Amino acid sequence: MKRREFLASIGGAAAVAPITQVSARIVDDPVGPDLPMPPSRDSLPFRSEPEEPGRLLLDQAWQFHQGDIPFPKIKGHGWSYANAKAGQAQGAAAVNFDDSDWPLVNLPHDWAVDMPFDPDANPSQGYRQRGYAWYRRSLRLDPADRGKYLELQFGAIATNATVWVNGSVAAHNWSGYNSIYIDLTPTARFGDDLNTIAIRVDAEKMEGWWYEGAGLYRHAWLAKRPAVHIQTDGVHADPRRGDDGRWTVPITASLASILERESTATLSAVLSDAEGRTVASGAIEATVPPLGNAEARLELAVPSPRLWSVDDPNLYTLRLSLARPDEAEDRRVLRIGFRTFRFDAEKGFFLNGQPLKIKGTCNHQDHAGVGVAIPDALWEWRIRRLKDMGSNAIRCSHNAPPVELLDACDRLGMLVMDENRNFNTSPDYIEQLRWLVRRDRNRPSVIMWSVFNEEPMQGSEAGYEMVRRMASEVKALDSSRPVTAAMNSGLFAPKNVSQAVDVVGFNYQPDLYDRFHAVHPDVPITSSEDTSAFMTRGAFESDPAKQVFASYDDERSSWGNTHREAWKAVATRPFVAGAFVWTGFDYRGEPSPYEWPSASSFFGIMDLCGFPKTAYWLHRAQWIDDRPLLDLAPHWNWAGREGELITVMAMTNVEWVALFLNGRPLGDRSVDRFEMPRWQVPWEPGRLEAVGYRAGHEVARALVETTGAPVALRLTPDRIVMAGDGEDAQPITVDAIDARGRHVPTAQLPVNFKISGGEIIGLGNGNPNSHEPEKGDSRKLFNGLAQLIVRADPGAGPLRITAQAEELKPGQSTIRRLAASPRAQVPPTPSVQILEGWRQSPASRDKPDPMRKPVDSDMNSWLWLGTGQIEAAQGEGNWISLRATFVARRHVQTNGGTLRFGGIVGRAEIWLDGRKVAAKPEFAEAPLELALPAGEEEHVVTLLVESRPGLVGGLSRPATVGAR
Ligand code: GAL
């Protein structure tokens, strides 16, 4: 369907942007330097069935404090004793810490991208200060969740993190790229007794030489599972093709139990195809010991599956359920794919028996405006951008990617080199590698494990021994994928890492491809990283003083190659499995070869926003064979340069190109796709047109025109519909057009934005030298373009954006927000001050003295009580004294508040700071509330509780302090 009909078919002029705002050019291949992004689509981002029904997102309403909060200096026996006990973390890790005035943030959250650019900060981290921060969250668990296995999950935290749950350390985490799973079950609190999660993040620590972001930048989850359950990342189900050509899905599920006795459960598996038809099923029983693990194994036979490939990424759905009589089932939903692949030392990579040159890019994980806090839909968008260019592979350099990226790769057909971050064989780090393999080994997209990138020990025996150990850990978990390592030297050292891997990754060094292959004809090799060339998007003249690179693919790093050189070296050698261009997208940090003011890289095929540079059209023309493609560089706005020679380059996959300026022929060129044709053209305003031929027939045209001055702004969303699920986000292209509706590639205007029905969560323009804030509502166009990342509000209705610049007609876009059910979230839980540290006196026959307290060195004669814990006192008598001290939170200190006892059992007198303030005359359990005066002092609260036979007095529910 042509674009015009398509817009008409989705109807409603009010609902969609007028057609002139979408594309000025309606041609069969509507993408090109004239409108650098594809026209808008009308589909929602893919949201697959949740992997684990019952797992809730824990993204909302985290309390956030930027900066560190030092722990108090512990002094004195009583405090030292308490500090050493479970549940008694101090300072901001304490259950009772006053976080009531901390702002709330939602995940994913990257605080570094909110920081200003700072010339004193590290260029490698994009001149952003990172520092320390704390997050806290209260979590209310339903009493009905008692008996379930409860797990807290963080996708990743940048960079080092300590997590406390209910005042006890629950995890120390030493990488910013791996998930953290915390078993909440033993110390979980239920009902009004809230759970407290406190996280100290140390983002001063770095694991890379690129921008790493800071904070809880991936999703967090709360998983609630039956007592006997499938463990996190505990399913291995990766189809295998036997030597006889038959396909099976061997399934192993790791089971765990929190029960006190052995238990038997039945694992059932149902595999269905893309149309939902069941193609295989099976079941098996397993016995799980108390607090132990077991593996349930079964195998499904699938006679003739439809294969997964990069062109037809066909997925099957595997539904697993673990059942016990009279118990809820634990369920998992996995998407798997049937494919074979191999690396051949002579002929390169084969997918499903067919040779396939890997056309890959390396990428970091940040995007304009949002840093590393990438909304799920933006991952899909980024993978789509790469696919549109003809790329079929991505290297997750140099760390484990988020699952959302891998989901998009499985679904869209993108091969993945999955990479480990830290080269270290000590237990913590080996566990990071094992986690990566366990998490990702069912994915059809993942074709190799990279254990490291460019390690100085790569040419040594120690490096060899380390990789041997890492490879063996990987093989123990996944026998189907090769292990690789990205080496930039040491390949010919007597003992080196290439001897310990299955596929040798070459970072650069294309001049060694032949030599290595000659010496090791049986060892498969791939480029793991190549190119490292420099371009500034939209610039066609280098200006070292301004730190700008022309986009003609002429400039490169001293260790790298131009895009064309690097690809030629790979493409002309069948034994090199493929290319991984450094990089697909620009990224913050590593502004090589420059430093300040440049803050992000120049290496990308696309800029930080995903706007194409010349390299994009170049690779597209080299990587896509069938469709004729023809694009021209540069733009044709060179007023004042009349008669000067301008270099013109065609990026094309046709055989022959003829170039015309204002109708005059400028000469034909036969096309060498490794080089691409060039002309030197004396500039005059007008139309520069190229006509492409195959077999003597015209098959493609490209046009660049001198435009007039900008008269209006234009907004082009990626999609004209969005899901009103509170999460959907998308990039919106901002450009300026002339009186004839043509994109003005040289506009550099400041633009302001207004939005309703959504939120601008970030802005960018791809200029590595810009220090404009990435949050807010204004941004300059850079070489004609800027980008908004917009998140739709929950619910249905229009999302309207207006762009304004002085003297220009405003640009407008209306996006339809469709009703969509939000993913299940743990509701926000306001933080409450719960009184802790109750001590209970020995029993006495008489009413105790309210002033009596345990001496600081006595840890034994007064009991220690948890919240809501009632315990019979030691000694004779029916009276006890319950005592706690507390400082009210700041708002109560200022305004006064309420002290609320959720439940007191027994008759009681309540004393506050030495004065009797209330009495409870009845024995039966009842709540009690009293006013707390304003004031900063430490309060002492004492309850004198009288029991009677058959009834043990005390605090049956938490006591809290809150606002009046
Ligand atoms: C490589 C390295 C990459 C990046 C690149 C820049 O050596 O692996 O992370 O730094 O150089 O060219």
Image (cartoon, helix red, strand yellow):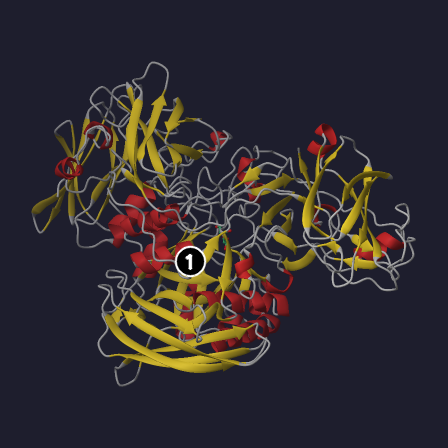
Tell me where residue 304 sits by quadrant. Answer: bottom left
Camera-side residue: 99 or 392?
99
- Sort mark 1 into few (<14), some (14-19) or many (20+) by Cα contacts within 10 Å: many
Viewer-closest of 20 and 698: 20
Tell me if I can see residue 522 in this picture. Answer: no
Amino acid type at circle 1 is Arg
Is 99 on the left or on the right of 224, as rendered? right
Residue at the spot 34% in from the left edge and 24% down from the top edge: 802
**Element type where label 1 sits in the image:** strand
Residue drawn at x 47%, y 73% is 501
Farthest residue toward the bottom? 244
Residue 683 coordinates in the image, percent (x, y): 25, 26
Direction from residue 130 to residue 623 in the image, left or right: left
Q: Where 528 sits versus 208, above or below?
A: below
The quadrant of the image that shows the C terminus is: top right
In the rendered image, residue 340, in percent from the top left (x then y), is placed at 30, 73
In the rendered view of the protein, which quadrant contains the N terminus? top left
Quadrant of residue 566 within the rendered picture: bottom left
Please indicate, yes or no, whether residue 676 appears anywhere in the rendered image: yes
Q: Against 255, is 242 above or below?
A: below
Residue 423 is situated, as x and y percent measured from the top left of the image, at 58, 64
Mark 1 lies on residue = 395
In the rendered image, residue 660, in percent from the top left (x then y), is placed at 15, 33
Q: Left of 781 or right of it: where is 67?
A: right
Is ligand 1 closer than 8 angstroms to the Cβ of mark 1? Answer: no
Q: Foreground residue, 796 or 334?
A: 796
Residue placed farthest to the top in the image? 807
> Number of labelled discs?
1
- Residue at screen point 42% across, 69% down: 329
